Amino acid sequence: MFFRKRDQSISWIIVFLGNPGLRYVNTRHNTGFFTADIVEKNAHVRINRLKFKSLTATANLGGQRVFLMKPQTYMNLSGGPVRQAMRFFGVPLSNLIAVTDDVSLPTGKLRIRRMGSAGGHNGLRDIISRCGGDGFPRIKIGVGSPPHEDYDMADWVLSKLSGDDERLINDAAAQAANALESIISKGVERAMAEYN
C-alpha cells in the first residue's frame, strides 16, 4: 500500500506554491505564499517548522486538523515534499489542496477546481507526477498574462508586483484563505459555487 497507517490528527494537507528566497518575494509566482501568510495570521500559527523540505505548521481550519506546507525546493520540485507528507500522514490525494498562481486567469480572479491538468504550471505538474495523479482540489489565483506575446513567461511570473496588480492579488489571496476553510468544512463543490 502506498500510504502508511493514517495519523488521525491530520486530515488534510494544504500546499502553498512559491519559490523561496528574497529574490522571489512579492512576485506573481509566489501568490501561493501570499495566501499562506494570510492563513498563518488567521489561524494564529507560524509556518516556520522545517519538515519535508518545507516550512510547515499544523492548524485547525474548517473544523479539521490540517498540515500547512510552503515547499522550499523551488516551484518545479514541489511534488517531492508533498509526496513525503502524504505518505507520512497517510492523507489521500483527494485531501490535498494546492494554492497557486495562474497566468490564464485575469489578475485577482479566484478559481477553485476539483481536479484537473497542470494547465502549464510546473509546480502542479510535479505534484501530479509524483503524488499519483490530478485528483486533488486546487485554488488558482489569477496573475494575468504578459502584456504582449513576445514577453517571456518566466520573466512575467517572476516580476515584482506593484500598484493595482498587487492590491488585486492580495485581495484574492485573502479570499483564497477563506475558500480553503470552505472546501474543508463544506466540500469542494459548495466552495466552487461560493467562490468561482
Image (tube, helix red, strand yellow):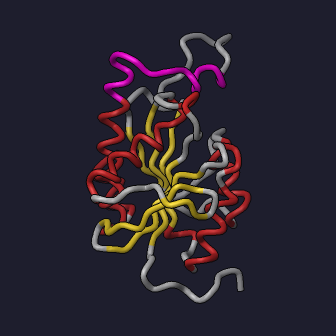
Q: Which residue is painted at 34% across and 33% down in the image? A: 170
Residue 191, x across and y down, in percent: 33, 57
Give the mark count.
0
Q: In the image, is residue 158 part of the stretch drawn in magenta?
A: yes
Residue 157, relative to residue 9: is it above or below?
Answer: above
Q: Which residue is painted at 65% across and 23% down in the image? A: 153
Residue 156, x across and y down, in percent: 58, 21
Instruction: Indicate the quadrant containing the C terminus: top left, top right, bottom left or bottom right.
Output: top left
Most foreground residue, 182 or 48: 48
Residue 119, relative to residue 131: is it above or below?
Answer: above
| Left or right side of 158 for 131 | right
Residue 150, relative to residue 22: is it above or below?
Answer: above
Residue 136, x across and y down, in percent: 54, 62
Q: In the image, is residue 51 part of the stretch drawn in magenta?
A: no
Residue 84, x across and y down, in percent: 65, 68
Report the predominant secondary structure element of the magenta stretch. helix
Magenta region, residue range = 153-168
